Image (cartoon, rainbow, N blue to C red):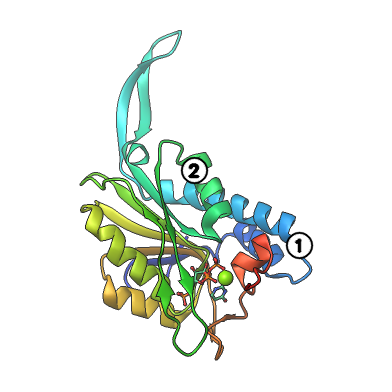
Amino acid sequence: MKRDERWEGVYSFEDSPFIMEILTELRDERTGPIAFRKGLVKLGRYMAYELTKTMEIEKVPIKTPLEETEGTLIKDRRNVIIITVLRAAIPLMEGLIKVLDHSRVGIVSASRSKAPKFEIEMKYVKVPQVKPDDTVILADPMIATGSTLIKVLDEVKKYGNAKRYVIVGVLAAPDGISRIKEAHPDVEIFVAAIDRELNEKGYILPGLGDAGDRAFGAPIKI
Ligand SMILES: O=P(O)(O)OC[C@H]1O[C@H](OP(=O)(O)OP(=O)(O)O)[C@H](O)[C@@H]1O
Ligand SMILES: O=c1cc[nH]c(=O)[nH]1
Ligand SMILES: [Mg+2]
């Protein structure tokens, strides 16, 4: 895990060869939906494992069959809410929850309109009550303009105040990170990698394409 000097509380995993290898497969245009979804699940699992290193732990007395000793409990792991941003976060959440298995889960839909407006439509919001001990993880593979996550954070913060708000994603563009940090300075961001820029259609470069379409196939308009 590597802190990015450009912002407070922004981390990438560019120093982790294993996470980079999974990302390489996701970026590769030859990777089909089955392997793409599996890659997102794997990333979710390993990123959740890395995230536990930033959580509050407690030392607890335990008894082995032979003697008394001290054990470790990750206190914060018991108080996690994962907000899954449809569609592309579904496999990422599946991986996160393998490690953060006590999590309550919120589901929100967010769909970004085409350039230049990039308006976010949020039709479905089901979020549990947020308590002061909670770590709220906002799972969304792609942070492009940042508009989706700004809107999701605006909404989720209505459900109570959390101890931490943490975005877990795969790729981010610098512009999107700056916009999110401006709107929500308290949010921490953990992504596999921070890419170069956005193209005129709002896609991350070099990126991995449209994460939702690659995981689930392109929808059609009827
Ligand atoms: O940072 P932004 O510019 O807001 O873009 C990022 C959003 O775009 C993608 O979702 P999309 O709207 O394509 O929906 P989908 O997951 O259903 O494809 C992605 O999963 C993010 O939610
Ligand atoms: O590059 C991008 C940008 C937004 N959403 C995606 O799925 N990919
Ligand atoms: Mg999409």
SS of the residue under disc 1: loop
CA–CA distance in space, label 1 to label 2: 24 Å
Q: Quadrant of ligand 2?
A: bottom right
Q: Amino acid at mark 2?
A: Ile
Q: Amino acid at mark 1?
A: Gly
Residue 31 horizontal/vertical position (percent): 76, 64
Q: Is residue 6 visible?
A: no
Residue 52 horizontal/vertical position (percent): 42, 46
117 lies above or below 124? below
Circle number at residue 97:
2
CB of residue at label 1: within 8 Å of ligand 2?
A: no
Give residue 71's quadrant in the image.
top left
Q: Residue at x 51, y 53 (%)?
A: 47
Along the line of sight, which residue is nearer the eye, 31 or 128? 128
67 lies above or below 30? above
Q: Report whether 189 appears left or right of 221.
A: left
Q: Which residue bears the numbered disc 1?
A: 32
